[in-house]
């Protein structure tokens, strides 16, 4: 009896200790668990991404939960989730989309010495003093492809010439309202001004071989088949086709050539794939960490290579036979944030000139 009564109090003390310990662990565990997870909403899905994310987890212990969707799907989802959104990091392609998402209040500013030193100012969202809301992680150029047999390079080596009457009935494009075109046209507007841009877009519409339909790859194929002679494409679609071993792709590549437009003037339009920290990120530190990781030499190479793009960070070298074959070029220097910002005005012009 004595023994029992002697044991009891200590058993009680022990269980109280366990309870206290549990409550302490309970208080600290969720916080610790939070730091070990990162929710990523990504519009990019390439094979190299696996290595990209695995290396981050290896270096930091932070596990990445991925939600894959296309750009529009991610934006819709973020909007409907609101402040309850589990998203920490968002990857979107094209400055037009990134700027729009920023304007819709889906991101938050990030101040990071690493990102500021690694990502060029022209490839980031505008810094209102609290940091940029998005950061370019890879670049692509919007170039002109043409039918080698029916078109001379001299006739298509500027964007302006897409509207020249000499190219009547030869041009095909994807929808004018697609972000890739909104950005390009927003860039042209920055260089030519709104009035000249409207006249230019009117000329492009007048030169169309057909109504806008399909993506960039369809335009390249239409140029090869002779349905049209001149088209716009992002470099990675062309590079993908150049690296393809499929006989039909090879046949297409045989028939076409590409040119980096405006090498004698403002340079070829360059756009980005970019990353942002979500407005309601529950793991903000991990999210900033991940963005900084994406800007590291190793991650830059993976990120660019996965989609035949160039690294956003200067001096990171990649070996991509298709991009190397395209050669070096002069890129425009206006900030992509400005390009993104012009999209509303561009859309109004497109509506007026009937560019579907
Ligand atoms: Fe694309």
Image (cartoon, rainbow, N blue to C red):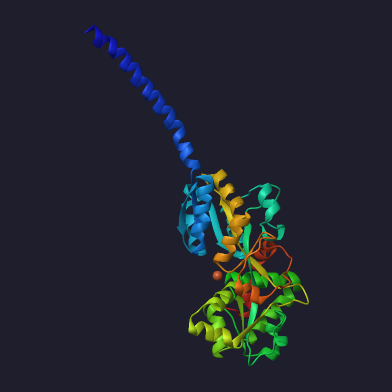
Nearer-the-camera pick, 177 or 241: 241
Give me the residue at 62% from left, 68% from top.
319
Name the outermost residue toward the right.
Answer: 264
- Measuring from the top left, give residue 118's x and y in whole percent: 68, 54
Q: In this view, does 240 lie above or below 208?
A: above
- Measuring from the top left, give residue 77's x and y in whole percent: 47, 57
Quadrant location, ligand no. 1? bottom right
Q: Is residue 106 above or below residue 9?
A: below
Q: Is residue 140 left or right of residue 35?
A: right
Q: In which quarter of the image is the C terminus?
A: bottom right
Q: In this view, does 290 lie above or below 271?
A: above
Q: Can residue 235 be seen in this view?
A: no
Name the outermost residue toward the bottom.
Answer: 150
- Measuring from the top left, give residue 66's x and y in whole percent: 46, 55
Give me the residue at 45% from left, 37% from top.
30
Nearer-the-camera pick, 64 or 229: 64
- Measuring from the top left, give residue 107's x and y in whole percent: 58, 52
Nearer-the-camera pick, 190 or 236: 236
Q: Can residue 18 be seen in this view?
A: yes
Q: In which quarter of the image is residue 102?
A: bottom right
Q: Quadrant of the N terminus?
A: top left
For the image, the number of numbered tags is: 0
Give me the residue at 33% from left, 21% from top.
15
Q: Quadrant of residue 161?
A: bottom right
Q: In this view, does 272 lie above or below 204?
A: above
Give me the residue at 74% from left, 66% from top.
333
Name the outermost residue toward the top.
Answer: 2
């Amino acid at each position: 009896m004595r023994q029992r009564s002697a044991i009891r109090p200590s058993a009680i003390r022990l269980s109280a200790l366990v309870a206290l310990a549990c409550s302490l662990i309970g208080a600290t565990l969720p916080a610790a668990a939070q730091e070990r997870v990162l929710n990523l909403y990504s519009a990019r899905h390439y094979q190299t991404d696996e290595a990209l994310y695995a290396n981050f987890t290896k270096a930091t212990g932070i596990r990445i939960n991925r939600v894959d969707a296309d750009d529009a799907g991610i934006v819709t989802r973020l909007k409907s989730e609101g402040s309850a959104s589990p998203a920490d990091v968002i990857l979107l392609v094209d400055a037009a989309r990134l700027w729009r998402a920023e304007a819709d209040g889906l991101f938050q500013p990030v101040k990071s010495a690493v990102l500021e030193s690694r990502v060029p100012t022209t490839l980031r969202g505008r810094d209102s003093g609290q940091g940029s809301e998005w950061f370019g992680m890879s670049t692509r150029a919007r170039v002109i492809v043409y039918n080698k047999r029916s078109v001379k390079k001299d006739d298509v080596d500027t964007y302006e010439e897409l509207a020249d009457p000499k190219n009547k009935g030869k041009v095909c494009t994807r929808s004018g309202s697609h972000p890739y075109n909104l950005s390009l046209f927003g860039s042209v507007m920055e260089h030519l001004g709104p009035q000249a841009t409207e006249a230019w877009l009117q000329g492009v519409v007048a030169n169309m071989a057909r109504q806008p339909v399909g993506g960039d790859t369809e335009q390249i194929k239409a140029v090869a088949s002779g349905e049209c002679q001149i088209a716009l494409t992002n470099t990675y679609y062309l590079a993908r086709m150049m690296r393809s071993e499929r006989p039909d792709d090879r046949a297409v590549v045989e028939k076409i050539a590409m040119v980096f437009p405006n090498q004698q003037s403002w340079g070829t339009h360059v756009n980005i794939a970019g990353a942002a920290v979500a407005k309601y990120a529950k793991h903000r530190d991990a999210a900033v960490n991940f963005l900084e990781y994406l800007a590291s030499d190793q991650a830059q190479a993976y990120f660019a290579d996965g989609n035949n793009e160039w690294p956003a960070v200067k001096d990171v070298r990649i070996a991509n036979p298709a991009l190397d074959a395209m050669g070096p070029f002069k890129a425009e220097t206006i900030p992509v944030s400005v390009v993104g910002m012009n999209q509303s005005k561009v859309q109004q012009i497109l509506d007026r000139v009937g560019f579907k």
